[in-house]
Structure formats: C-alpha cells, structure tokens
Image: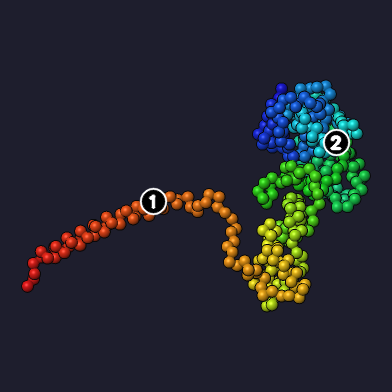
Amino acid sequence: MEHTFNGCGCGINKKGCCRNSHQKLSTFDWLCDLPETHKETDYVEVQFKNTRKGYFLNNTRIPLEKGDVVAVESSPGHDIGEVTLIGRLVLLQMNKQNIDPEKYEIKKIYRKAKEADVEKYNEAKSKEQETMIKARQIAESLKLNMKIGDVEFQGDGNKAIFYYIADERVDFRQLIKVFAETFRVRIEMKQIGARQEAGRIGGIGPCGRELCCSGWMTNFNSVSTSAARYQDISMNPQKLAGQCGKLKCCMNYELDSYVDALKDFPSKEINLETLDNTYYHFKTDTFKSAISYSTSQNFGANVVTISIERAKEIIALNKKGIKPDSLEDKTNEGEKKVDYNNVVGEDSLTRFDSQKKKKSGRRNRPVLKKNNQRNESSNQQKRNDKPSSN
C-alpha cells in the first residue's frame, strides 16, 4: 500500500528523481538515470519535518525507492520519515556533512511504514501546533528569556523536540519538568539560531525566490557589515536585513570576487590634487575598473570618472609634488572609446525593409515627375482654349 507523506504535489518520481521537489533542502539526484548506482551502498537519506535529515543503514536490504515512507530507529521507539536519496549520492552527502560511519553509530531502517504507523504519525503531528502555543505560555509564566519557535513530535508520539531561540544561556531544568508533566512525553530541547528558524518556517525573499536558508543552504556563515562596504551597498539596515532580522546571507555570495577585484584599486582615503581643485573619492565601479572623484566630500560635485591606471598615475605625481592640469588624460581624448560591440553587427532588425522603401521611392520619382508635367500641360491647354471675357 502506498501512502502520501507531507503532501507531495509534484511527486517524487520513485523510478528516478524529483526535478521540482517541494521539500526544503532537497538534493537533485543527477545519478537517478543510472540504476547501477542505487545498489552501491546500503545507506539511505531520510527526511523528517522541515529541514531535519538523517542517514540510516538499510541492513536488511529492503527494496527502497525515493518517496517511500519508512520507520527508522530512534531513541526511544521509532520515527517516521521519507526516503529522499539512495545510492552513490548518499555517500557524497554524508562526506559533505562530515559523517563517518566508522566514528558515528548509524541507526537502522526497520521497515516500510504500515498503515498503522502512518495513522499514529498523523495523530502525533496534529498535536504540534497546540503544544507549541501551550509551551510558549509555560515559558512566559516561568519568565524565561527564550522563544519557542517550533515543536516536532516523533513518529510514534513518544518524544517531542522543542526548538527554541535564546540570546543568552537559559536554565530550563524547571521548564523540562513542567513540559514532561503537562505533555506526558519525553522532552528534548534544541537551540537554533534566527537563520535556522527562518529556514524552518520558509518564505519568499525580496528577490522573489524561495529563501536560501530553506531551499538549499545547510551551513550559515556569519555576515558582517564590511561585506556591504566592499560591494558599495547602501548601509540601510532595513534593506540589509533579511526576514530573520539578521544580515542577508546573499551578501557573502559575491564578496570574494569584490575583494579580489579591489586589490588593484588605490585607497579611498587618498585625495587627488590638481592645479584647480582637490578631488575626493566618490564612487567605485569595481568590475569596470573605474573610480569617480568629486570636489566635495559630502555630495557629488564636478564628478570625474577615471581609470585605475590614471588614478595611480596622479597619486604618483602628487607624491613628487606635481599637480596635473586635470584628472582626465588628455593624451587619449582623440581615441574613440567603445563600450561594447554589437554581435549581430547591425542596429535594427527592420534595416532591410527601410532600404527597400528608399529604393522604391527613388524608382517612383521619375514617374511622379512625368505625371506632374502632363497635368501642367493639360491645364495650360485648357487656359488657352477658354474664351476671353472681352
């Protein structure tokens, strides 16, 4: 019997790969078309609620495919999850997560989930929302400086994981006792960061795409405001912060490219001296290798854009006590600067039509001239034939 799990709309292709997976942090199985790779290992990747994943050993060689719902070993009891990856790619993912089977005890897969297992799983999941609200009320009554972001029940309903956020260390020993008495299950507290909470909740970013933390990111590196300074991004806190309230993770994506490109640029603190004015750094165009200077420190006035080579040349002249006439290099003024080349080589797609019109117009000119001459001669003949009023 097949069971639906987590409401798979696009469906995981059990014979291959899910190219439009609904699940968070799903891995594209680029080896799905090679059946021989599926039997290379007995390790299987199983995903639970939201972003929680685990790797289990299929020691009994149960025939499993992507999308199968399985009962796996847990402590205590068992948990219910969905197979999201099998075959050689599982080994690559375990290596990426630094999971060594020789050092870590890999738990086992018990069986494919039966109808009774799925019913018990759904019953446990139905309690999560109510439990989370009540848990927040208990934490508030104990005056603990923490926020409970999510609750996840184990598949058999014997254990509940409480995910919480706290800026400081929290003594929740009393809280666990109250939780155990209230909910009658085994309690596990797991602290997460603001970025991980956003990944668990999910959402759409300002770019219009799914949040990176809920789509594909597994490691969260710290992001500092220096990343914005290197990329000349406006230091507006509302624009720099993501939905988690922290600096956006995407600010780190191109940071290395900017840092490498800016190595050749002179310092922004160096002013350029000419015979007329003192120029201050205004703007840097990193990938065009150009710098803009202004005669005012606070706003753009008489802005001049020059290349890196020209800026270094002026700095070297200023160190010698020489001030050029202007920032621009007048020796190359006569050269025509080409920003880009049109690959097609033409400007308009209707260029052939316009040429035809011009040619047809030239051909018709003599005909029009002859017609005008005929009309003039006929009018002159009519005037001559008209009798005089005298």
x and y percent of residue 139 in the render?
Answer: 85, 47
Can you identify the residue that label 2 sits on? 99
Residue 356: mark in rendering: 1
In the rendered image, the residue lying farthest to the left is 390
Residue at 55% x, 52% y is 342
Observer-nearest residue: 217 or 168?
A: 217
| Label 2 environment density (alpha carbons within 10 Å; few <14, some 14–19, many ≥20) | some
| Secondary-structure class at tag 1 | helix
Observer-nearest residue: 335 or 7?
A: 335
Specify which label sits upstream in the sequence, 2 or 1: 2
Observer-nearest residue: 375 or 217?
A: 375
- The amino acid marked with disc number 2 is Ile
| Secondary-structure class at tag 2 | loop
In the rendered image, the residue lying farthest to the front is 331
Quadrant of residue 267 within the rendered picture? bottom right
Residue at 79% x, 36% y is 93
Q: CA distance from mark 2 to mark 1?
A: 71 Å
Residue 349: tell me if it is visible.
Answer: yes
Residue at 65% x, 48% y is 208
x and y percent of residue 11 in the render?
Answer: 67, 32
Quadrant of the drawing holding the N terminus: top right
Residue at 83% x, 46% y is 192
